[in-house]
Image (cartoon, grey):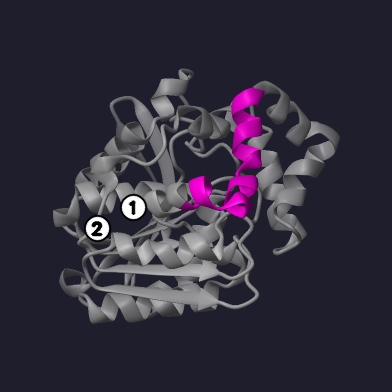
Amino acid sequence: MDTHVGSPYDNKSIAARLGGETFTTDLDGLVFDGFRVPATGDAADRPVAVLVHGWPQFAACWEDTARQLAAAGIDVIAYDQRGYSPGARPEDVADYALDRLLDDLDGLRRAWGLDRFHLVGHDWGGVLGWSYAAQHPEALATFTSVSTAHPVAHATRIAEDPDQYERMHYMRRIRKDPAGVEERMLADGGAKLAALYDGTFAEDRVQSYIDRFSQPGALKAALAYYLAYGGARPEDGPVTVPTLYVWGSEDLAFTRGAAELTGQYVEGDYRFVEIPGASHWLPEQEPDVVAGSVIDWIREHP
């Protein structure tokens, strides 16, 4: 159950604004929260897009994208990932490994009755998406990665490009001292956490994220993704699913080199959309471009 209520950015408030509904889905005792927004038209013919957030965000980041997808005739489901849903917050770091995230997504799509769907992932949702597209192509009509380069492209540039290596300093810091990072990010009313968003979206939205990460165990669970991640894997290699990659030229995590190399790891139809001047936080900073690109991609690959 989503315990973050009373905020204009909780799932209930977002669902109400979008004409949708909230949901909880139980997978082997882990309870995932989210919202769904139905499009108009014959339900039997409507495509379904599943939107997966990253760190440090929640399903709420997709509000403006979801609104536009639904208006274009696409059903939308957005969920708070493991660790972000209060009812799906295990203690063991190993429970946040990529394979567990993959199990979550595949279990959820089966619980929702989806044989085939369109996947959109940002940040960690993109990492998850690249792996899911490689391992479960039969379940996807399309995959869209927002901001996140292919893991092998990213790893290659980390090894070869000092700039890309330096941009990963935050991950090394988290791995070295996760408890210290958690404490520092929540100190002074979450000032360091707020600084990560770089002033790219509304202060009340930022505050809603700080409030949610201030819940017991919430930020610790989110940071566990970095502790559990084992890096790029052979099984996450070339993707055959039609893939769209939307990247901002001022992304602080993924360099142009990683972004441009990504296409080499897609064997299916591929499109790269660069948003000049945009940062890492595309779902909230550039929802019109993200939504428009996804809508076009889905229409081209129903």
Say left or right for 124 vs 152: right
- Which residue is the site of mark 1? 130
Q: Earlier in the sequence, mark 1 or mark 2?
A: 1
Label 2 Cα crowd, 10 Å radius (few <14 / some 14-19 / many 20+): many
| Residue projecting furthest to the front | 160
62 in magenta: no
Q: Indicate the amino acid at tag 2.
A: Val
Which quarter of the figure has residue 188?
Answer: top right
- Which residue is the site of mark 2? 239
Label 1 Cα crowd, 10 Å radius (few <14 / some 14-19 / many 20+): many
Q: Indicate the amino acid at tag 1.
A: Trp
Which residue range is magenta in the image? 157-178
Q: Position of residue 238 (x, y in %)?
A: 25, 55
Q: Position of residue 122 (x, y in %)?
A: 47, 56
Which quarter of the figure has residue 294?
Answer: bottom left
For the residues bearing labels 1 and 2, Cβ distance under 8 angstroms: yes
In this rendered view, identify the residue nearer to me: 174 or 67: 174
172 in magenta: yes
Looking at the image, residue 254 lies above or below residue 165:
below
Query: What residue lies at 30% left-to-right and 59% top-to-bottom?
Result: 265
Query: What residue lies at 66% left-to-right and 32% top-to-bottom?
Result: 173
